[in-house]
Image: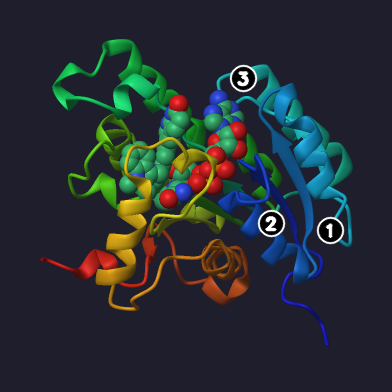
Amino acid sequence: MQKLMEGKKGLVVGVANKRSIAWAIAQACADEGAQLALTFQGERLEDWVRELAETLADPPLVLPCDVLHDPQIRHVFDVLEEKFGGLDFLVHSVAFALKDDLDGRFVDTSREGWRIAQQVSAYSLIALSKYALPLMKKNGGSIITMTYLGSQRVIPHYNIMGVAKASLEATVRYLAADLGPHNIRVNAISAGPIKTLAAMGIGGFSRILDFHREHAPLRRNTEASEVGDTGLFLASSLSRGITGTIIYVDGGYHILGA
Ligand code: NAD
Ligand code: IMJ
């Protein structure tokens, strides 16, 4: 039987290690026959990402990409143009804020901290989409990013990242409106808390996981594979009528009032 993603080419930005949400989406898409390119941020992550890449049936291209660095972004898409000749989907799974800004009082957020969080976590979606556009123009495409409930509600310590995710979610809507006429869809997945590198060292994260498990309607924590499967759905033609939306993969936690 023909696989769902057979013949589709995708770029996944944001794999750091095997726990990364980006890796769960990459695996789900690769299992359905997608051909992938993965990027890594900085040399310290290169070996990890290359090792993971080799575990996929059709080993992906692996390229460096720091989203703060326009020439690196341009290089990634130049290589994709040459090797793939086009692009069907793009997964953006990147966030960063200064540690100091994820602690203490929100009112103490620095100008520089705000700028960094916005640049890495929100502007990068615009930058990547801009370069993806010419590669997706012919056949349309799907752009997927990762967000968190802290964009809509006040969640302790999320602070400046909540503002960056609010900006990212608005960016999804503006990009969806802009790129829709090219049959390029833009959506976000809002995941429940998952123990990844980006969640390590966050004060009280185990308590956050416990609280989520006890209160979410599904009474369990969100698994990366559940997010991976929703990523696959959004990347595939099964979601062809959906754009500009935020899909919650959080066991229903976001519906709760108390
Ligand atoms: P992760 O640490 O595995 O992934 C974060 C990625 O961001 C890493 O691969 C890192 O290299 C990359 N990154 C940071 N700065 C970068 C830069 N300048 N250039 C290129 N890449 C850069 O953690 P994760 O939890 O898989 O996070 C992925 C996404 O999921 C993030 O957007 C995060 O906000 C979101 N998210 C995570 C959770 C959670 O609980 N883990 C919940 C909801 C949403
Ligand atoms: C992050 C901070 C505070 C509370 C948090 C999180 N909760 C969750 C996260 C409740 C679920 C994880 N998350 C959704 C993120 O988007 C994380 C982003 C992040 C994490 C770090 C840690 C290390 C660092 N900078 C970071 N920047 C962004 O130095």
Task: Assess whether mark 3 and mark 2 are in contact (beta carbons under 8 angstroms).
Answer: no
**Mark 3 vs 1, N-terminal side:** 1
Q: Quadrant of residue 17?
A: top right
Residue underneath mark 2: 26
The answer to whether residue 80 shows anywhere in this view is: no
Residue underneath mark 3: 70
Mark 1 residue's CB less than 8 Å from ligand 1: no
- Amino acid type of the residue tagged 2 in the rendering: Ala
Q: In the displayed structure, does residue 100 sit left or right of residue 187?
A: left
Q: CA distance from mark 3 to mark 1?
A: 29 Å
Q: Position of residue 66 (x, y in %)?
A: 63, 24
| Element at label 2 | helix
Find residue 5 and name its label: none
Q: Residue at x 28, y 70 (%)?
A: 214
Mark 3 residue's CB less than 8 Å from ligand 1: no
Along the line of sight, the residue nearer the viewer: 81 or 63: 63
Q: Residue at x 82, y 33 (%)?
A: 79
**Mark 2 vs 3, N-terminal side:** 2
Of badges 2 and 3, the one in the foreground is: 2
| Element at label 3 | helix
**Mark 1 vs 2, N-terminal side:** 2
Find residue 56 and name its label: 1
Q: Position of residue 112 (x, y in %)?
A: 34, 11
Q: Position of residue 148 (x, y in %)?
A: 35, 50
Q: CA distance from mark 1 to mark 2?
A: 9 Å
| Element at label 1 | loop
- Amino acid type of the residue tagged 3 in the rendering: Asp
Q: CA distance from mark 2 to mark 3?
A: 24 Å
